[in-house]
Image (cartoon, coloured by chain):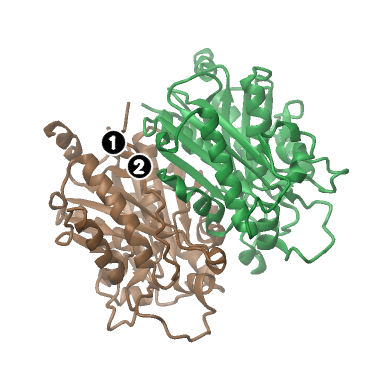
Chain colours: A green, B brown
Amino acid sequence: MKENIKRAIFRYSSPPSIKAFSSVAGKKESQGPIGEYFDECCEDSYFGEETWEKAESRLQKTAVQLALKKAGLDASSIDILFAGDLINQCTGSTYGLRDFNIPFLGVYGACSTMAEGLMLSSMAVNGGYAEYSLNVTSSHFSTAERQFRFPLSYGGQRTPSSQWTCTASGAVILSGTGNAPFVLGGAVGKITDFQIKDANNMGAAMAPAAADTIKRYLEATGTKPRDYDFIITGDLGSVGSVLLHELLCAENIDICDVHKDCGVMIFDGYKQDTHAGGSGCGCSASVLCGYFLTKLFNKEINNILFAATGALMSPMLVQQGESIPCISHLVHISNDRDFLLRRGEEK
Amino acid sequence: MKENIKRAIFRYSSPPSIKAFSSVAGKKESQGPIGEYFDECCEDSYFGEETWEKAESRLQKTAVQLALKKAGLDASSIDILFAGDLINQCTGSTYGLRDFNIPFLGVYGACSTMAEGLMLSSMAVNGGYAEYSLNVTSSHFSTAERQFRFPLSYGGQRTPSSQWTCTASGAVILSGTGNAPFVLGGAVGKITDFQIKDANNMGAAMAPAAADTIKRYLEATGTKPRDYDFIITGDLGSVGSVLLHELLCAENIDICDVHKDCGVMIFDGYKQDTHAGGSGCGCSASVLCGYFLTKLFNKEINNILFAATGALMSPMLVQQGESIPCISHLVHISNDRDFLLRRGEEK
C-alpha cells in the first residue's frame, strides 16, 4: 500500500467518513456573520470557570462532549484523540481532555492545528490504526492575548493588520465506515519563513505557507481550483488573503473565485472592530465544523480543500530578534468518495 | 488492514526499519555513566549561539544533520519530519528545523515526545504514507529551567525528588525497507492525573502513566516482562522508578529485573549532584538513540519496550492550583521482525 502520491501528499485508499462534528463559540463570534451555524454559543467568556485557561479547557471539553453526543458514541468507543492548542504546553487540550480516558496524541501546529489533527486522525483511520478517531482544538481570546501579546488590562491601540483571536472550538469524529462527507487525502505543510518579524501581521507571515501547500496539492492531484466548491484557508485575514492571491497568481494559479478565509468570514471587521479578521486554532476549527461541514453534510457544497494556517511564533525568539516561521496543512473533504481515484485514472 | 490489536495498541503488518539514529549531548551528560555512547558531545552549552533557545534549536538541527549523514540521505529524501520539544511553541523544533524544507508535523508530548514521534513516524511508514520518515526531539537545561522553574541566576536549593533537565537530543530515521532493528508496534498513552501538584516531583506524577501503558501493551500482546531484554522508561528518575515497580507489582506484573530508566542511567546522581536523575525530552531521546539503539544494532540486545514518560504540566495552571496530568507512549523495537506476529499465532 502506498498512500503518498507525492512527497507527503496523500490519497487514501479507504477514505474515512466524517461521523460527527461540533462547534462551540464565544459571544463575539456568535454575533458575527456566521454565528447561527455554531452548535453552541456561550455568553460567559469564563464558561463558568475561574480563570481564562480553565475556561479554554472547558470550551474544548464541551466541543468533544457535543461531538460524541451527535455521533451517538461513548468516549470509550474512540480509539485515539488528537488535540492541541495555542497555549503553552497545550493547556486547553491536556487539562480539558484528561477526564475522557481516551488514548491521546498531542499535536502542535499553532493555528493550523485543526488541519494537522484532522490529517493525522484520517491517516489513523485510513491506515487501520483506529476505527473511530477524534480531533479537537480551541483558542480563547483572553488566554492568547495575555500569552502572546499584552496583559488584558493594557488598552493599547491595535494595528490595522492585527487579528482577533477567536474564542471557539471545533471537533470532528472520523470512522472507518459510514457515509459522506469523506476525508480523501491531504498535504503535510513545510515550515516557511519569509522573515516577517511583526507579530501583528500574522497574515503576511502565513500567506507563503498556504500558497506552497495549496500549490503542491493541486499539482500532485492534477486538479484545478475550479474543481472545488471552496479552497479554504485558516486565518490569513484580509491582509494575508490578498497576499495569497498574489503569490498564487504569480504561479499561474487563480483561486480568487473559490477562496474563502475563515478569519475573514467569522467577524464583520468594520462593525465588530476586529481589524484584519479572526485568528487562533478555534477560528478555522469552528468555521470548518460550524459552517462548511454543515453545508457539505446538507449537500449544498460537495468538494473542499481546507488549508489551515499556523504561525509557529515564539514570543521569546521574536524578542531575541528572530522572525516568524509558519506552516499550512491541507485536508481534502468531499461527498464524492472516489473523486481523487477517478482523477488519478483520467490522468 | 487492521493494525490495532486492541484500542490504540498497534502491531504493524510491515514493521519499519530503523535506518539511522543519532544522539547529541551537552557537557554534563557526556561526563555521565553512558557519555561514551553519544555521537557528539559539545563542551559549549550555547552551541555557538547567542541565547539558550537558539542553542537548543542548534542542538536539534545538529541531531538531524547527523542522522541524515549516518543514513546517507539528503533532507529531500525524507517524506515527513515529526518533531516537538518542551519549550513554548516547540521553539527548538520549529526554529531549529525550518531550513530543512521537509514536510513537518509538530507533536507535543512533553518528555514523552521521543516515543510519540517514533510511534507516529512508524505509523506513517507502516501505513504507506512515507518511504523515509524522521523524528527528533531535544531539551536544554537552561531553556527548561527558566521556563518551568526559576531564573537561572537564582541559586535556590533543589529538593531531593527534583530532576535535572538534560541538554541532549536524539533523532531516528525510519524506512519502509531495510534491516534490523524494526519498530514492531506500540501503545498510545492515556492522560493520567493522580493529583500530584509538586512540580519538583515529576517522577511520582508520571509513574502511573507509565504503569498503565506498559500494562496495557503486555496484556494486549500476550507478552511478559521476561520476553524483553529491557523495558525502558523515559525519565521517572529514582523516585518514580520505585513507584512504577510498586504500581505494577500490585497488578502482578514484575518488571524489576528488566526495567531501566533513562533518567537514572544518564547521570551519576551522587557524583553529579543531579538528585533523582535526568529529565527532559532529550533525556530519553539521547539514551535511546545513544545507548539502546546502538546495542540493538550490535545485537547485544534484541527486544525492548521503550515507554517515554511526559508530565504535561502547565506552570500557569499549577499556579492556579491545578495538578500535573501525565502521559506515557510506548514503542516496541526488536531485531526479530516477526516477534509479535509469531506471538499472535502462538496464542
Q: Which residue is mark 1?
A: B12
Residue B271 vertical position relative to residue B143 in the rendered view, above or below:
below
Residue at mark 2: B122
Task: Please tell me whether residue A276 is drawn above or below residue A151 in the rendered image.
Answer: above
Chain letter for mark 1: B
Q: Residue furthest front?
A: A48
Q: Position of residue A334 (x, y in %)?
A: 58, 22
Q: Quick one: SS at disc 1? A: loop
Residue A44 appears left or right of B209: right
Residue drawn at point x = 55 percent, y = 63 percent: B317
As rendered, which of A324 and B4 lies closer to the eye? B4
Q: Residue at x 72, y 58 (%)?
A: A199
Specify the amino acid type for callout 1. Tyr
Marks 2 and 1: in contact by CB < 8 Å? yes
Chain for disc number 2: B
Give, as a three-letter code, the residue at label 2. Answer: Ser
Please say whether residue B182 is visible from this viewpoint. Answer: no
Give the quadrant of the N terminus of chain A.
top left
Mark 2 is surrounded, within 10 Å at the Cα level, by few (under 14), some (14 to 19) or many (20 or more) other residues, namely many
Q: Is residue A126 left or right of residue B288?
A: right
The answer for how far apart the CA atoms under marks 1 and 2 are is: 9 Å
Q: Position of residue B255 (x, y in %)?
A: 18, 57
Q: How many marks?
A: 2
Res. A108 visible in picture: yes
Mark earlier in primary sequence (1, 2): 1
Vertical side of A147 occupied by B78: above or below: above
